[in-house]
Amino acid sequence: MEKSQVILKATGVRKSYRMGATRVEVLRGVDLAVREGEFVAIIGASGSGKSTLLHILGGLDGPDKGVVEFDGRDLNRVGARELNRYRNETVGFVFQFYHLLDELNVLENIILPAMVSRTVVGWILTRRAAKERATELLGQLGLKERVRHKPYQLSGGERQRAAIGRALMNQPRLLLADEPTGNLDSMTGNGILTVFEQLNRAGQTIVMVTHDERIAARAQRVITLEDGKIRA
Amino acid sequence: MYKLTLIIRYLLKRRITHFAVLAVALCVFIVVVVMTIMTGLVEDFKQKNHRFVGDCVVGTDSLVGFPYYEEFMGILKETNSVQAVSPAVKSYGLFSLRGDQVRRGVEIIGIDPALHAQTTNFAQTLHYRAGRPEKAFQPTYDPNALGCVLGIDLALNRSVQGQYLYDDQPIQVAITLTCFPLTAKGAPAKVGAGLVESQHFYYSDHAHSGIAHVDGATVYIPLDQAQKLCMAGTLKRVNAIHVKFGPDVGLSQGRAQVVALWQQFKQTKADAPDSFLLDGVLVQDWKEYRRAYIAPMEKEQVLLSFMFILVGITTVFIVFVVFYMIISHKRKDIGVLKSVGTSNVSILGLFSGFAFVIGFLGSAVGALTAWLFLSKINGIESLLFEWFGFQLWDRSIYAIGDIPNHLEFHVLATIMGCAIAACLLGALFPACSAARLRPVETLHTGPV
């Protein structure tokens, strides 16, 4: 099988945080490459820097040192506007605690990334297409009956599926998942992983962070993060 | 687009925003109602004073007065900008019902009623002679008797509702006015002859100017009688010449013209007898002339404006607290929004827009309720009086008819604009801190 191209590349990424009087070095020179269509799991103990690495890869945070490139573009060197567009169009985030907006219903939560990138006029012109896309995602994720429900009316698994729908709304090239099953029972978590596998089979690139080896085993490739470094 | 959706949802779903809207509405309501009533009272008082004295007064504070007024009136009458002039003697004396031992101090104003009616609103203040001011000093029951016009509160009693009970014609009452006539030098003219001059008059009409101190302690008598009562000497004197300008003449322009004419006139009289009395004469527009009465009310208005600034600061603080609370509860939302590509500026716009909507809604609700309240305020007051005997302003004390409730659109728009600005100001700091919030600080936590 011909190897696909590397879309995401991290080189020598370092990150530290100040905790009180001391500075804690979370990432100590991480090198990582993700190919298009790959399903990569990053595994590591709690506090090993998995989430920090994921945030840096998704442009939510910047490294102290090192380079993160997407399609050859250094994320550190792009402007704020382009970084916002990167988060809106190129990357989709799935969080452990779903982080759906309580005031919006399921459909509105899923549609949110499409709304963010458009003006009122732009939204009026593209609203129909966005709703069709969201409805299609709701069908794929088994949430068709939950369109008008508020997050508090959903089960944990349904909330996470709605969050996956939101992450996929703008058809991102990279899906970043931070402990997506961490807050779910094993059966529901298994369902979420099945969704990830289906998405990956359809060509979606996924980078998932987890502390659970059994969950990581569902990915094509497992990378272990230990003491802020990728274990060889 | 997401901003509009979220603003509407935050507004509908977050109860705390309802309190913010209510707080803004209350502040706007208070400011609009108090401002309208206070401004109405001040404006009403100013207009009453304007109508009472005419546009401009050439006069002196001295009770001695000044001579050569007829010559200067002749000059004024020839001036295009002057429409009418009226001389007046103003002094103080004692008033008593004939045969009564009780005397009270009053201001005596001697006028030519026909001229005074052309210069001021004297005719409109009369009751029996409103259409014939030239006959103001002719009692209807005896046109040959020497009449006087009393301030309405000297003549009639007022009911608690502020209404006067009029008869078909004035009751036949004689009054005695006693005064100390002064020479041109300011000395009592009747030294060795009892000091005072007295004259009997018959009540011919009453004047209702709407100015409490005028209506309560003023007696109008014919000019020549006032000169006899209050002044002594070979040259006739007055204390003031009231001037009314033409309809197209501005107040400052007209006043400047009269000042120039008075300076010229004074020079021509430099060597005339008693010309020193002209030095104390001032040309003042009605605002300057009535400054002693108007200024305290204007000061009250300034004080009130200062208090409204405090109300505004309170609004800013309330909105600040509300937004601080909302943003504290919405840190996760801000993180999510940033994770889907929302910029810092957009987050700032979201919460500023939210503040604008709260300000707009609050001020609209406040303005609407204030408008409704003001439009019914006199009815409400009447009902309160009927049911509980409570009156906001005792009409027997305050010279007002209805409570002023005319709402000026530009005032309303300004207050609403200020309320919205206060909301934006109150939300500024929390909105800025929301915009600066790092998403990683909020997203890697469990649900709150």
Image (cartoon, coloured by chain):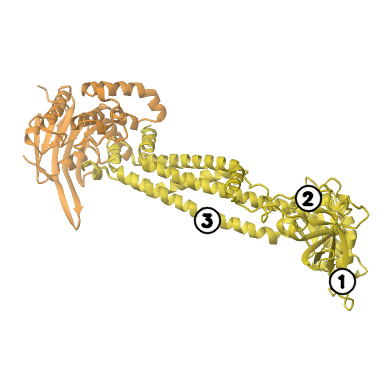
Chain colours: A orange, B yellow
Please state which of residues B260 and B28 is positioned toward the viewer in this rendering: B28
The secondary element bearing badge 1 is classed as loop
The secondary element bearing badge 3 is classed as helix
The secondary element bearing badge 2 is classed as helix
Type of amino acid under label 3 = Met
Question: Dot 1 corresponds to which residue?
Answer: B184
- Chain of the residue that carries numbered disc 2 in the rendered image: B
Q: Residue at x 78, y 60 (%)?
A: B218
In the picture, the quarter occupied by the N terminus of chain B is: top left
Badge 1: residue crowd in 10 Å (few <14, some 14–19, many ≥20)? many
Type of amino acid under label 1 = Ala
Relative to B169, is A70 above or below?
Answer: above
Type of amino acid under label 2 = Thr
- Chain of the residue that carries numbered disc 3 in the rendered image: B
**Disc on the earlier residue, 1 or 2:** 2
**Residue A6 appears in the rendering:** no
Apparent side of residue B339 relative to residue A32 in the rendered image (left or right): right
User: Which labelled disc corresponds to residue B125?
Assistant: 2
**Quick check: do tags 1 and 3 share a chain?**
yes
Q: Position of residue B51 (x, y in %)?
A: 75, 51
Q: Position of residue B324 (x, y in %)?
A: 35, 48
Q: Residue at x 66, y 47 (%)?
A: B402
Name the image quarter holding residue B227.
Answer: bottom right
Q: CA distance from mark 1 to mark 3?
A: 50 Å
